[in-house]
Image: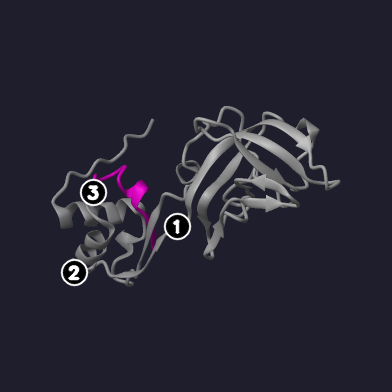
Amino acid sequence: MILSRKWLNEFVDVSDISDREFDEAMTLSGSKVETTEDRGAEISNIVVGTILTMERHPDSDHMWICQVDAGREQPVQIVTGAPNVTPASVGEICPVCLHKSTLPGGVKITKGKLRGVPSNGMMCSHEELGLTLNEIPYGNPDGLLLMPEGTPVGVDIKTLVGLDEYVTDFEITSNRPDCLSVIGLARETAATFERELKLHEPV
């Protein structure tokens, strides 16, 4: 049974309990933790940005020099050759990997030059963030992840796409079918940590 800590907190507030303490206490109470995953552990320094201006790369027929508002004092210059970037992409919102950012798999992004033009980061796709189209249905398999209109600029991308998430996988034995649900594990959590269980009222 896979449990999201964020979802669990809707039923019993254990937000002050560290992930390690939670896993150990739940295992000791009889709800054995099989595996855990911090979904955003490998992702850092990636924020939401919007494309302010674009101009053709002087030494490429498919690359663009973009000025991007990433919520910093000054726009960030990024060179991109993403297939879904066109002259109409001004105003588009996408994930921006800033200088010294990291992506899943240990990929590190730093400033450099692309065909002689400075690029201070990278705009990325949902796949580069380790996401699938099932998780991000508005993703593009052939280019940048374009965020919905109104997405706030400068915000950590993890908080917007569900990667600020710690997931615990419990081994549920056949005699505990009551724990095969979030509410069931919330009851166990409330009993383990002596916290109030808050069940939602149907609307």
Residue at the image point whose x is 22% and y is 52% from the top: 17
Query: Which residue does the numbered mark 3 point to in the structure image?
Result: 14
The answer to whether mark 3 and mark 1 are in CB contact below 8 A is no
Residue nearer the viewer, 171 or 100: 100
Residue nearer the viewer, 151 or 180: 151
**Whole-percent x, y for residue 5 in the image:** 34, 52
Image check: 166 left or right of 141? left
**Whole-percent x, y for residue 7 in the image:** 36, 47
Query: Could you tell me how far apart the alpha carbons at marks 3 and 2 are, in whole angstroms?
Result: 17 Å
The quarter of the picture where residue 109 lies is bottom right
Dot 3, how many residues are within 10 Å of its Cα: few (below 14), some (14-19), or many (20+)? some
Query: Which residue does the numbered mark 1 point to in the structure image?
Result: 39
Residue at the image point whose x is 54% and y is 65% from the top: 105
Query: Could you tell me how far apart the alpha carbons at marks 2 and 1 are, in whole angstroms?
Result: 24 Å
Q: Secondary structure at mark 3?
A: loop
Query: Which residue does the numbered mark 2 point to in the structure image?
Result: 28
What residue span does the magenta drawing correspond to? 1-15
Q: Is residue 136 above or below residue 29?
A: above
Image check: 173 left or right of 145? left
Residue nearer the viewer, 189 or 75: 75
The answer to which of marks 2 and 1 sits earlier in the sequence is 2
Task: Say which amino acid is labelled 2.
Answer: Leu
Tell me, yes or no, if residue 144 can be seen here.
Answer: no
